[in-house]
C-alpha cells in the first residue's frame, strides 16, 4: 500500500524548483545552521500583523484574546529578536548564525535611539567604533562584502547588529504604513492563520495557514495573503499563485488577494508603499495547479528526485544544499533525526 503524503505549498514549490533540494530538506532532513534575514523578518512582520488584524475580528478564541492584549510593536521586536534556528531559540542580534544582505542596511532611517543602541553594543564588540566614525566603519564592511571577502568575527557581529537595527526600524515603518493604508479598507476580519487541510482521493493532503480572511469595504469576503516584497506586485501574481489556489479551494471562496508591503524605502514620498490587489481564482487555474500538484505527489511517491541545476543560483546566491549536492560536503548543515 502506497503511503499517503502530507505537503505544504512550500514543500510543493521546493520540489518544483529542484527534486534534490526537496530530498535534502524533507527526506534526508538536512537543515542549514544559518538563517537568512528575509525569513525571520517576514515571520516577525506576520506576527505583528496578526495582532493588528485581530482588532477587527468580532469573535476571538482564547489564544486570540491573550494575543490582542499585546502591543504589536512589542510582538514584532520580540519575534525579530528571538528566532528559532533548527530547535534552538537564539538572540538573532548577537549571533553569527544570521545572514544579512547588504540591502538590509539602511542608515538613513535610523533614529537617535537606534544609533545609541548600536553604539552601546559596539562598545562590547569593537570599542573603536564611535559616533563619529560608525558610518565609515559600516561603509568599509560593505565594500569588503562586495568584494566577497570575509569580515573578522567582531566586524561581522557588529555589521549584523547594524543590519538588525535597520530591519527593526524598517519593520516598524512598514507596520505603520499597513495600518494607514490597508487596515482602513477592512470592515471585518473573520479568521487569521486558519489551518488548511485539503485532501485528495488517495489519502494525501495539502496543509498550510491562511494569513487572514476578511470582508472589505466593497462588501466582498476574500482569502488574503500578506506579502513583504522587494518588488511590486500586480494582478499577474494572483494568476501565478499556487498558494492562493490552494487556500481558495480549501475555503470554496475564490475571491482573494494580496496585502502588499514593499520593503524598499524610497527617497520620495511615500517612503514605503503598501496596497491591496484583488482577484478571483478561475476554474482553469484550479485545474492547472492541482494537475501539477498531482504530478508532484506521484513523483515523490516514486522517489523521483532529479537535480535541476538551473535552480542552483535561482535567488542570487547558492542553494543551501549546493556543497553537499555538488561536492558531497555537508559543512554548515545539520541532519535532524527522522520523524
Image (cartoon, rainbow, N blue to C red):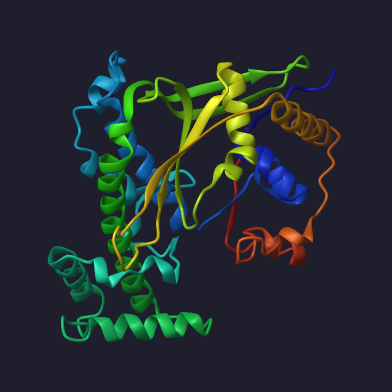
Figure check: 155 above or below 213: below
Rendered view: 263 above or below 213: below
Q: Residue furthest front?
A: 218
Q: Taking 292 as reference, is 106 above or below it?
A: below
Q: Nearer the viewer, residue 26 or 115?
A: 115
Q: With respect to residue 36, does 161 lie above or below?
A: below
Image-quadrant location for residue 131: bottom left
Q: Nearer the viewer, residue 126 or 192?
A: 192
Q: What percent of the width, then of the height, locates residue 249?
A: 62, 21
| Left or right of 277, for residue 302 | right
| Quarter in which the C terminus is drawn | top right
The answer to whether residue 113 shows anywhere in this view is: yes
Q: Count of labels shown?
A: 0
Q: Nearer the viewer, residue 229 or 184?
A: 184
Q: Quadrant of the N terminus?
A: top right
Q: Position of residue 319 (x, y in %)?
A: 64, 60
Is there any visible trace of residue 23 in the rendered image? no
**Residue placed most toward the observer, 15 or 264:** 264
Residue shown at the point (62%, 29%) measured from the top left: 245
- For image coordinates 77% across by 31% down, the residue present is 297
Residue 113, given in percent of the width and then of the height, sits at 13, 63
Please tell me which residue is depicted at 67% across the width and 45% down the height of the picture.
Answer: 14
Q: Say left or right for 45 vs 235.
A: left
- Residue depicted at 30% across the width and 39% down the height: 48
Amino acid at each position: 500500500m502506497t503511503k499517503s503524503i502530507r505537503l505544504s505549498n512550500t514543500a510543493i514549490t521546493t520540489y518544483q524548483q529542484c527534486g534534490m533540494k526537496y530530498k535534502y530538506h524533507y527526506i534526508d532532513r538536512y537543515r542549514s545552521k544559518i538563517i537568512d534575514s528575509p525569513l525571520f523578518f517576514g515571520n516577525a512582520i506576520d506576527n505583528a500583523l496578526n495582532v493588528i488584524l485581530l482588532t477587527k475580528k468580532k469573535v476571538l478564541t482564547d489564544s486570540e484574546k491573550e494575543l490582542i492584549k499585546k502591543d504589536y510593536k512589542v510582538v514584532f521586536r520580540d519575534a525579530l529578536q528571538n528566532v528559532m534556528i533548527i530547535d534552538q531559540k537564539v538572540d538573532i542580534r548577537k549571533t553569527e548564525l544570521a545572514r544579512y544582505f547588504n540591502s538590509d542596511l539602511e542608515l538613513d532611517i535610523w533614529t537617535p535611539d537606534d544609533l545609541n543602541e548600536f553604539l552601546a553594543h559596539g562598545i562590547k564588540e569593537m570599542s573603536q567604533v564611535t559616533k563619529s566614525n560608525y558610518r565609515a566603519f559600516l561603509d568599509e564592511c560593505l565594500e569588503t562584502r562586495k568584494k566577497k571577502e570575509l569580515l573578522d568575527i567582531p566586524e561581522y557581529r557588529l555589521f549584523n547588529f547594524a543590519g538588525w537595527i535597520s530591519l527593526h526600524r524598517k519593520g516598524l515603518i512598514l507596520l505603520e504604513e499597513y495600518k494607514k493604508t490597508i487596515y482602513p479598507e477592512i470592515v471585518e476580519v473573520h479568521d487569521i492563520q486558519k489551518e488548511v487541510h485539503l485532501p485528495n482521493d488517495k489519502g494525501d493532503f495539502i496543509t498550510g495557514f491562511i494569513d487572514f480572511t476578511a470582508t472589505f469595504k466593497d462588501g466582498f469576503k476574500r482569502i488574503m495573503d500578506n506579502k513583504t516584497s522587494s518588488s511590486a506586485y500586480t494582478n499577474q501574481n494572483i494568476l501565478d499563485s499556487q498558494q492562493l489556489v490552494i487556500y481558495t479551494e480549501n475555503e470554496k471562496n475564490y475571491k482573494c488577494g494580496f496585502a502588499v508591503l514593499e520593503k524598499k524605502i524610497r527617497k520620495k514620498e511615500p517612503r514605503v508603499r503598501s496596497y491591496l490587489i484583488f482577484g478571483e481564482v478561475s476554474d482553469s487555474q484550479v485545474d492547472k495547479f492541482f494537475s501539477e500538484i498531482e504530478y508532484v505527489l506521484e513523483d515523490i511517491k516514486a522517489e523521483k528526485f532529479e537535480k535541476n541545476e538551473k535552480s542552483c543560483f535561482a535567488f542570487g546566491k547558492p542553494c543551501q544544499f549546493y556543497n553537499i549536492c555538488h561536492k558531497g560536503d555537508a559543512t554548515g548543515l545539520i541532519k535532524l533525526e527522522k520523524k
